[in-house]
Image (cartoon, grey):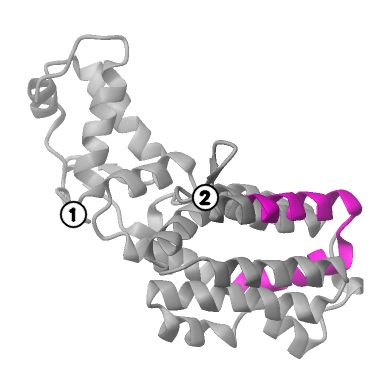
Amino acid sequence: MALSTTPDLRDQITEELARQLFSADLKLGDFLPKELDLTEQFGVSRATVRSALATFTSHGIIVRISGLGTRVQDYQDWNILSPQVTTWITQYGRDTLIFAKEIFRFRKAVEPYISMEAARRATAKDLMQIETAWYGMKAAIENDELIYRGKHFQEFDAEFHEAIYQASHNLVWVQIGRSTKPAVFFLIKKTTEAATELSDSLERHRRLLEAIRLRDAEAARKACESIIDRAAFDLELSDLNEEIKQNSLAHVAMGSGLANDDFVAE
């Protein structure tokens, strides 16, 4: 592969290796070519190759094994919450359903509970942010390209859910919401692309907004589950959806009596 000798040469090599790793040209457990072979393949110094490989090591995608070489790690070791990793999955991934299922499991287990907390704790500012994101979704859906003021429907959708994490006013959940935003956006993108229409999803989001506005935690839980149920239908994950439902945080919390303000961390 011929690469230009520009200052971003390392980035070019990183992108080419990402394509090979995420498109399954290199499979889990495979060993990468030796560093010397990579330097010859790309026509660069060993230091440049090592710098590119370090990017993947830092994300848990590859590991160097002394005396053997550099091996592709199992998916469970990959930092799929990294915006960079999520971008590579979106750009180059062939079997993205594996990642979609894991992100879906997380959302189904966690977000109904977060919605309950948001219904209890949302401020006027929080409600405005959730509402602004919803109106962005509504305006985008009225455009054939699903874009409003330069932003796609999917972006407003992701902002809607991030704002709900913010409205929980729990430092841990807020940080998790920020960290998972790229992964959630990836799932939203797949859901939007798979959906035959979006008006039903918009209405389900409206119900969640209204439940939070009315401080009705139980209605918020049900509305959030309804949104995720629709995503499961669009992604053909309904069986997985039912499997996770009874083990979600919201159901566990209600069953154990933890779903009340006394047990919310500040």
Helix, strand or loop at label 2? It is: loop
Q: Residue at x 16, y 15 (%)?
A: 44
Q: Quadrant of the N terminus?
A: top left
Q: Is residue 78 visible?
A: yes
Q: Residue at x 76, y 55 (%)?
A: 131
**Residue type at mark 1?**
Lys
Q: For residue 198: magenta?
A: no
Q: Residue at x 90, y 72 (%)?
A: 261
Disc 2 marks which residue? 143
Where residue 147 appears, x then y in whole percent? 52, 45
Q: Residue at x 61, y 65 (%)?
A: 202
Q: Name above or below for residue 145 compared with residue 207.
A: above
In this view, the residue in front, 258 or 54, is: 258
Helix, strand or loop at label 1? It is: loop
Q: Which residues are magenta?
A: 109-136
Q: For residue 134: magenta?
A: yes
Q: Nearer the viewer, mark 2 or mark 1?
A: 2
Where residue 257 appears, x then y in whole percent? 82, 86
In this view, the residue in front, 53 or 124, is: 124
